[in-house]
Image (cartoon, rainbow, N blue to C red):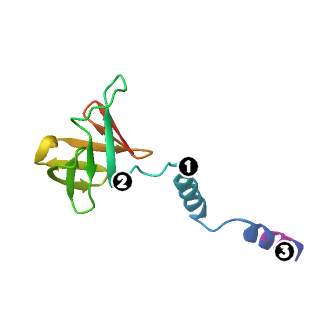
């Protein structure tokens, strides 16, 4: 009887099969930083030396259009995952990749949201 009670205690103390894999997956998800995302708003693009590049700077509007820094209509954009694809205007054919903290990488330039 004592052996049976000890065996039952050991069985109850062990997690069910597969529980370790689930716990491991949850722990890994907690460690991963959130995926970068594209934010709607005004972006100032900077040269490698940190100087603002007005010719590349833009504002993403919520309706799929973007405008230049002076407000002139430039073209349209489409977001796929964390990538912005520009059509028309001064950024036609360009692709910007989202980084953390509201930043986009446009070629070698870094664009930061204002």
Of badges 2 and 1, nearer the viewer stands: 2
Q: Quadrant of the C terminus?
A: top left
Magenta highlight range: 3-7
Q: Is residue 58 visible?
A: yes
Of the numbered discs in the image, which one, if any, rests on residue 39?
2
Label 2 or label 1, whichever comes before in sequence order: 1
Which residue is denoted by mark 1 in the rendering?
31
Image point 30% across, 43% down: which residue?
97
Q: Residue furthest bottom?
A: 1
On the image, the x and y values in percent for residue 96 come to 26, 43
Which residue is denoted by mark 3 in the rendering?
5
Q: Magenta stretch: dominant SS?
A: helix
Q: Kindly report the distance in space between the C-alpha atoms of the residues bearing marks 3 and 1.
A: 40 Å
Q: Is residue 5 magenta?
A: yes
Q: Residue furthest front?
A: 70
In the rendered view, tell whether residue 67 sits above or below residue 53. below
Find out whether the residues at labels 2 and 1 contact each other: C-beta distance under 8 Å: no
Label 3 or label 1, whichever comes before in sequence order: 3
């Amino acid at each position: 009887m004592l052996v049976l009670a000890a065996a039952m205690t050991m069985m109850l103390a062990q997690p069910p099969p597969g529980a370790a894999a689930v716990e491991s997956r949850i722990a890994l998800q907690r460690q991963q930083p959130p995926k970068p995302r594209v934010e709607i708003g005004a972006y100032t693009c900077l040269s490698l030396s940190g100087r603002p590049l007005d010719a590349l700077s833009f504002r993403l509007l919520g309706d799929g259009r973007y405008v230049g820094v002076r407000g002139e209509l430039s073209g349209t954009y489409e977001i796929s995952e964390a990538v912005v694809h520009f059509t028309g205007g001064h950024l036609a054919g360009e692709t910007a990749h989202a980084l953390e903290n509201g930043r986009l990488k446009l070629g070698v330039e870094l664009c930061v949201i204002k």
